[in-house]
Image (cartoon, grey):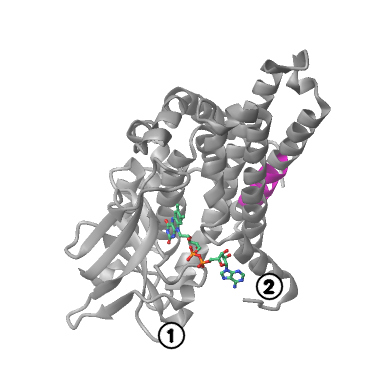
Amino acid sequence: MDLVLSDEQRAVRAAVREWVDEVVVPDAARNDREERFPQEALDGLRKTGFVGMTIPEEYGGGGADPLTYVLFIEELSRGDANVRSIMSVHLGLVAGSIQRWGDQQQRAHWLPSMATGQVLGCFGLTEPDHGSNPADLRASAEALPGGGWRISGRKVFITNGSIAGVALVMARTGGQGARGISAFLVPTDLAGFTATPIHGKLGLRSCDTAELVLDGVEVGSEALLGGEGAGLKVALSALDDGRMSIAASCTGIAQAALDAMVRYAGQRQQFGKPIAAHQLVQELIADSAVDVDASRLLTWATADLKARGENHSLAASKAKLFATEASVRVANACIQVHGGYGYVDEYPAAKFLRDARVTTLYEGTSEIQKLLIGRALTGVSAF
Ligand SMILES: Cc1cc2nc3c(=O)[nH]c(=O)nc-3n(C[C@H](O)[C@H](O)[C@H](O)COP(=O)(O)OP(=O)(O)OC[C@H]3O[C@@H](n4cnc5c(N)ncnc54)[C@H](O)[C@@H]3O)c2cc1C
């Protein structure tokens, strides 16, 4: 793996960093406090073209390589993990799946409007009774006599669910288990499709999370993505990229938390000197710095494998497991360094912890990542 960024990668990172500091950071705390959707940031992502960063140039996107993508995600998340989560789902889970599994017609239909952000994507895998084990999901798609499908079921905790124009929905078309599942690109304005926002989240309070109900939604045969019975493969390959993106996001949250604690430790005086001069405060900072670097390296290693067209499932699980747990540790350390001020929202420390906390849960909990890593290494499934 080459640890030196190209001139272009450095230029993109610098441009995103500048834009995030100017547009995303100033509104992040207020949006979080008021559970207010970051509309200005989304408008800006559209205007700058960042919204289509990884979509191939032939469809109007930026055609960015995987390492540039994780640099972008880290910077977004450093500014506000809510803005990052909108983009990870839109680009990584949905546009990426259309690029990977779509035929010419599906790509030409969806990718140009996703590249401009006119259409956003959401990813509907989780159901009320099926989270860690999606192979058992119950949403169903029944073949219609003249062609096409009628889809019914419920999906919960769907990021972008009420703002998306297309939902990538996994539903059962055959018998039990993984092989009976297919993936569908469902336009969200069809009759029978409803999305209800979920409120009261611990973190990621300003981005959209919704429950979806599909009540006999009828789609044409062109909605089927990747062929009948390939739905779980579509979903799991999307999650490889999603986990890489979450690891990048956690690196961004942890970097922001580290920057905040270094800043505060230099300013805050106790016992007649800056708290940075106390060894136990430096321990919190040093341990956090190592967590940030290790998270970034595991993320870059995953992106490097993907860029070279190699299997990156195991690397993505390792990166996600480490970086998510590390971001919780670092955000917690950030609160500790801020003392009582870390517990109130005058400083960003509490938001870092609340936003980081969900990352050990979604796109495969930490326990699930351990089982995936263990299975890959031993050849034995402990699920
Ligand atoms: C804010 C937010 C956004 C989300 N966005 C999306 C989205 O866009 N699309 C989507 O499809 N989903 C999304 N999710 C859902 C998320 O992926 C699931 O919550 C997650 O996969 C866990 O499923 P669950 O909540 O049903 O927990 P469960 O599967 O019920 O797990 C509960 C606990 O049991 C443990 N457990 C389960 N099985 C095992 C096992 N075999 N061995 C050991 N421990 C086990 C888990 O690790 C966990 O600790 C989101 C969730 C949240 C909170």
Marked residue nearer the N-terminal end (1 or 2): 1
Specify start and end residues of the magenta stretch as a single range.
293-303
Instruction: Tell me the residue that label 2 is attached to.
Output: 375
Taking depth in this image into account, of 220 and 180 the one nearest to the observer is 180
- Is residue 297 one of those drawn in magenta? yes
Q: Residue at x 65, y 33 (%)?
A: 334
Can residue 311 be seen?
no
Taking depth in this image into account, of 190 and 61 the one nearest to the observer is 190
The verdict on label 1 being within 8 Å of ligand 1 is: no
Reply above or below: 280 against 94. Answer: above
The amino acid pointed to by label 1 is Gln
Q: Which mark is residue 176?
A: 1
Taking depth in this image into account, of 237 and 74 the one nearest to the observer is 74
The amino acid pointed to by label 2 is Arg
Q: Where is residue 259 drawn, in percent x and y? A: 64, 28
Q: Is residue 110 left or right of residue 14?
A: left
Reply above or below: 316 against 233. Answer: above
- Quarter of the image containing the C terminus? bottom right
Say what secondary structure mark 2 lies in. helix
